[in-house]
Amino acid sequence: KVKMLAKYDRVALPVVDSDGVLVGIVTADDVIDVAEEETTEDMQKMAGMDALDDYYSQSSIFDLVKKRLWWLIVLFVGQILTAIAMGGYEEILQKVVALSFFVPLIISSGGNSGSQAATLVIRAR
């Protein structure tokens, strides 16, 4: 619908039934609101969290934590496991350098958490 509004430069589109009788209109404002909600939800899912139901400023701390908690726990556990593996096998890591490619797992955890926080604040309604 967004492409159709842009292509024909319309502010509203007619809605007709199967007989071609006008049953209503869809305004550009409605289409933009739906597109924004869908984009926000997609971005929040890409950042690894559930979409917020309310505006960010109106959400409780509990809701904000609840939306991110699952992924933060997964990232934390992954980070701990990687750190334990690296600490326990320090001598082997020095001999087999290829194993050190897992170091970014630890480093990226902070970036992933930051990405979640930024997406939550920026894209909240």
Image (tube, helix red, strand yellow):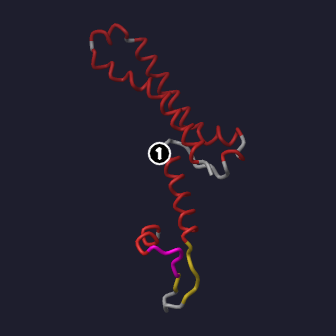
Q: Is residue 31 left or right of residue 6?
A: right
Q: In the image, residue 45 lies at what x, y percent?
A: 50, 47
Q: Residue at x 65, y 52 (%)?
A: 53
Give SS at disc 1: helix
What amino acid type is highlighted by mark number 1?
Met
**Which stretch appears magenta?**
9-14
In magenta segment, residue 13 = yes
Instruction: Check disc 1 and report the residue beneath it.
Output: 46
Binning the other alpha carbons within 10 Å of mark 1 as few (below 14), some (14 to 19) or many (20 upward) gives few
Q: Residue at x 53, y 91 (%)?
A: 21
Q: Residue at x 63, y 52 (%)?
A: 125
Q: In the image, residue 71 lies at what x, y percent?
A: 53, 37
Q: Residue at x 42, y 75 (%)?
A: 8
Q: In the image, residue 92 lies at what x, y percent?
A: 32, 10
Q: In the image, residue 5 lies at what x, y percent?
A: 46, 72
Instruction: Please say if 15 is above or below 4.
Output: below
Q: Nearer the viewer, residue 75 or 6?
A: 6
In magenta segment, residue 86 = no
Q: How many numbered marks appear?
A: 1
Identify the residue at the far front of this view. 9
Q: Nearer the viewer, residue 58 or 53?
A: 58
Q: Is residue 53 left or right of residue 118?
A: right
Instruction: Please say if 18 is above or below 92.
Output: below
Instruction: Please say if 53 is above or below 19.
Output: above
